[in-house]
Image (cartoon, rainbow, N blue to C red):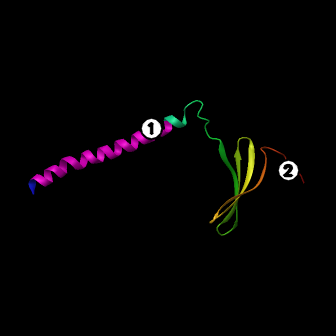
Amino acid sequence: MLEYLLRLALLLPLLGGLIWGSLWLTRYVQTRLAGQPGGGGRQLQLVETSLIAPGVKLAVVRFREREILLGLSRHGMVRLAEAPAGQPESE
């Protein structure tokens, strides 16, 4: 029993250190890959959302200098309209 407790006392901190190290390494690699030149950076930007009914939303996203109107529900997503970004509204 004493041998089991000694092994547990030695291996448990080692296992915790390995888990912490792998999480730290994953975060480090993800931030390095996101910051690489030529990686494109963030191309998708959420402009606005509007709740229509419970579980149903409208969302405007900007992607590659285009604004896209999306209909979002619990069952999926549908593209409703598309326009160049920054186009003035016609009234």
Identity of the residue drawn at 63% across and 65% down: 75
- Judged from this view, the residue extending furthest toward the left is 2
What's under tag 1, amino acid-wise?
Answer: Tyr
Which corner quadrant of the image does residue 76 belong to?
bottom right
Q: Which residue is labeled 2 in the image?
A: 89
Q: Quadrant of residue 58?
A: bottom right
Q: Is residue 82 left or right of residue 72?
A: right
Residue beneath disc 1: 28
Relative to residue 58, is residue 16 drawn left or right? Answer: left
Residue at image location 14% in from the left, 50% down from the top? 6
Of marks 1 and 2, which one's residue comes earlier in the chain? Answer: 1
Q: Which mark is residue 46?
A: none
| Predominant SS along the magenta part | helix
Q: Are marks 1 and 2 in contact (CB under 8 Å)?
A: no
Q: Which stretch did the figure color magenta? A: 3-31
Q: Is 13 contained in the magenta span? A: yes
Q: Position of residue 29 (x, y in %)?
A: 45, 37
Answer whether residue 21 is magenta in the image: yes
Q: Residue furthest top?
A: 37
Q: Amino acid at mark 2?
A: Glu
